[in-house]
Image: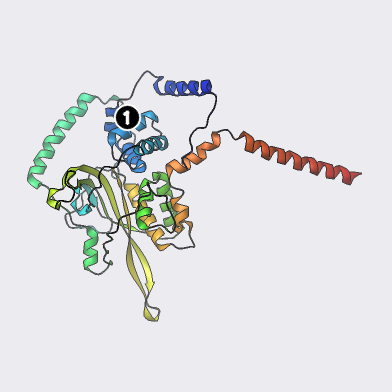
Amino acid sequence: MGYVAVKGGTLAIEESIKRLKYERVKRGTVLAIADIEGGMRGLIDQVMSEGSIYDETLAAIAIKQAEGNPEEAVFLLRAYRSTLPRKHYSHPVDTEQMWIERRISASFKNIPGGQILGATQDYTHRLLDFDLTDETRAEAQGWLADFYEDLERQEKQQGLIRYPKVMDYLRKEGLLADCEDQDQEPDDVTRKSLSFPSARSQRLQVLTRGQTGAVTSLAYAVIRAYGVIHPTVGELRVGQMPIYIDNPIHPDTEDEDTYFIGAVKLTEAEMIVPVTVERERGKKEIEFQIGYGLCYGQNETKAIAMGILDNSLEKGNPEYPTSDEEFVLFHIDSVESTGFISHLKMPHYVTFQSKLDSARKTKRQASGGQEEANR
């Protein structure tokens, strides 16, 4: 629905916009776009994921314009995205080809290729670092010089490594069903409105565009009470995913003529969900299902939450609202939900006056009936 401001007094609106700029610059400082890109990685990744566009600079501009408000930044990004032409379609990606920066499994201690912790807050003490108040650019650049020197030495020793998928080893043991290829063109919820029953491609798109807090909250509800499952992270990987397109001049040529246009940073989560199934003669066995999550940037909590909700929506258990695709998919979009709530601030004079008149009329009728009864 995406509500925006309605018409009002021109002068009042202009003064309101002027005041908005004053609030942003009143301390006499201006955030550089490069500083936002360099120091607000988590917020940029969130805004890109919810805005459905991968561009760190555009996300930084939106964050600056929105004064750090993620919902407003996503609104700005989606509005800009709607003006862009779609010139090419990329080839389908295989996340096994990801250039890994972080790769862990909570299901297995030892996985082929080993656990790669990468950059994460998981092992920090969560204490405020007051040294950051006096951090200087010179100190940061000196630290970076040492880091790059060490990194170059490691890369010469190790080289580029492709890591196999953990799930494939469970499939080889027959503990997970093989995934069938679905080569049909996926639905695009940005061009065609979501319909029910929804296709899985639609659900995954809406989940990855969903507001991070809302997706996380509903996934938590699945685990806590509304579904009562306790999934395990089979594999979580963060890294750069190479993107290829057809030859833009001769699109019908062979695959050897594909063009590498860059890489996007992705977070992928494959969740293992244990389920109890009843066999012949009432015998019960445990099987495993998969929930899948994929989103832009390093956005691990959201990717895991996506995997939980993906599995929950696939089951479609009518007992739980978190398995109701309409309930989940219609209420996690930040632009839709924020827009509808925010539109309540806009003038509702006519509708409220109508309700007020009805309330006054009812009260008068009730008072008249009471007076009549007292006579």
Q: Is residue 150 above or below residue 11?
A: below
Q: Position of residue 146 (x, y in %)?
A: 14, 33
- 87 displayed left or right of 159: right
Mark 1 element type:
helix
Q: How is the image coloured?
A: rainbow
Q: Which one is nearer the viewer's eye here, 245 or 208?
A: 245
Residue 346, can we see it?
yes
Q: Which residue is mark 1?
A: 130
Given the current orientation, which residue lies at the most extreme top position?
Answer: 28
Residue at coordinates 13% horizontally, 39% vertically from top-left? 151
Given the current orientation, which residue lies at the most extreme left position?
Answer: 156
Residue at coordinates 21% horizontally, 28% vertically from top-left? 140
Q: Which one is nearer the viewer's eye here, 333 or 197?
A: 197
Q: Position of residue 93 (x, y in %)?
A: 23, 52
Q: The residue under label 1 is which amino acid type? A: Phe
Q: Sort mark 1 into few (<14), some (14-19) or many (20+) by Cα contacts within 10 Å.
A: few
Number of numbered tags placed on the structure image: 1
Q: Position of residue 86 (x, y in %)?
A: 29, 42
Residue 126, can we see it?
no
Residue at coordinates 22% horizontally, 69% vertically from top-left? 173
- 239 displayed left or right of 295: left
Q: Is residue 170 above or below residue 8?
A: below
In what quadrant of the picture does the C terminus appear?
top right
Given the current orientation, which residue lies at the most extreme right position?
Answer: 375
Indicate the quadrant where residue 60 lies. top left
Residue at coordinates 19% horizontally, 47% vertically from top-left? 244
Q: Position of residue 152 (x, y in %)?
A: 10, 39
